[in-house]
Amino acid sequence: MVDPELPDEFALEDRNDREISVRHQASGHVYLFRISGAELVSGSTTVPNPDSDVDAVSLEPAARSAALEHIEAASKPGPADDAADQVIIQAHVAQRRRFIDIINSEPSAGTIFGEARTQAAQNVQAVPAAAPLALSGTPPDTEVTITQQASGGSQFRLDESGRIDLVPDPPANTDERQQELYDELRRKTFDLSALNPNLLGDLSAPINVFLGALPENIEAVSITRLWSRGNTLRRRLGAHELAVGSDEPDPARLPPLVAGQLHDLVDTLNVFITAEPKGHELDEERRGPQERELTVRL
């Protein structure tokens, strides 16, 4: 069995000038680090895989080492053509491995991979061999490896790393005001996730999951996913406010610092969602007829 502590068991998930994230391939946990020059800023954000029983916290040191290795490897010079071929091969192998993992695993309720298993089985035969691909020097056309699906349900496609993911529904409104609100939403989420885990308690997991719906580029956002995960934070804040109004001990009650930052985050989310047509539509659909007559929202 592969030792889960080894840094080479972490695959590069995403990388830009300010952030790098790696995925532990055995458990599916994702670790996000901020970059300063060629170094990692202290602290990290963990997005655990809820279907894994591997302790996500124990893997953080190995994840940090793996992230540093990826940064160092990217800075080493090498023949451009060979590097391009290696990127193509690695992406393609990851794509095939992801298909096989989905087919061989049992579908988990509430995950997109459980819903996508049948679709992956139908398409795995359409993936060509890696060697001919490397010779051609042309990346795979991810749009043609997934057949068209009927509307009315969840839509899937291959992302840039060859993984199956929901077809995004990007924001319809990306004007300057929305961009600034989105940047503030990301900053406030990072700040909240960086608080002491003992203060956050059970709020830590939904905060990290929400952070996963906030890519750096606003055009890469899925409004449905952002709204759904943000609504979880709204409900959690609502539970806290009910607990504060009671004299009885309640685990839903948050420390004042956490409650204040969460309230600020939810306020920013509400303003952002209201200006987004799809988000506004989802807000209207989530409320029952009686709630829609109220003018005050969480």
Image: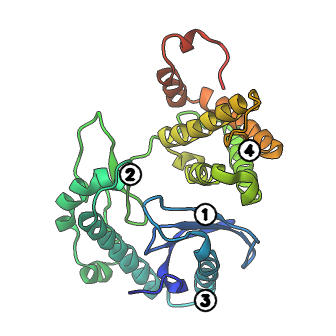
Q: Is residue 208 visible?
A: yes
| Residue under the image location 77 percent in, 46 percent down | 258
In the rendered image, the vertical position of residue 17 relative to residue 177, given as above or below: below
Residue most toward the right? 257
Q: Quadrant of the C terminus?
A: top right
Whether residues under marks 1 and 2 lie with C-beta atoms below 8 angstroms apart, the answer is no
| Residue under the image location 30 percent in, 69 percent down | 101
The residue that mark 2 highlights is 111
| Residue under the image location 50 percent in, 85 percent down | 8
Q: Amino acid at mark 3?
A: Lys
Q: Amino acid at mark 4?
A: Glu
| Precedes in sequence: disc 3 or disc 4 | 3
Which SS class for mark 4?
helix
In the rendered image, the vertical position of residue 136 relative to residue 290, given as above or below: below
Most foreground residue, 75 or 55: 55
Mark 3, mark 2: which one is toward the viewer? 2
The residue that mark 1 highlights is 46
Q: Quadrant of residue 175?
A: top right
The residue that mark 4 highlights is 184
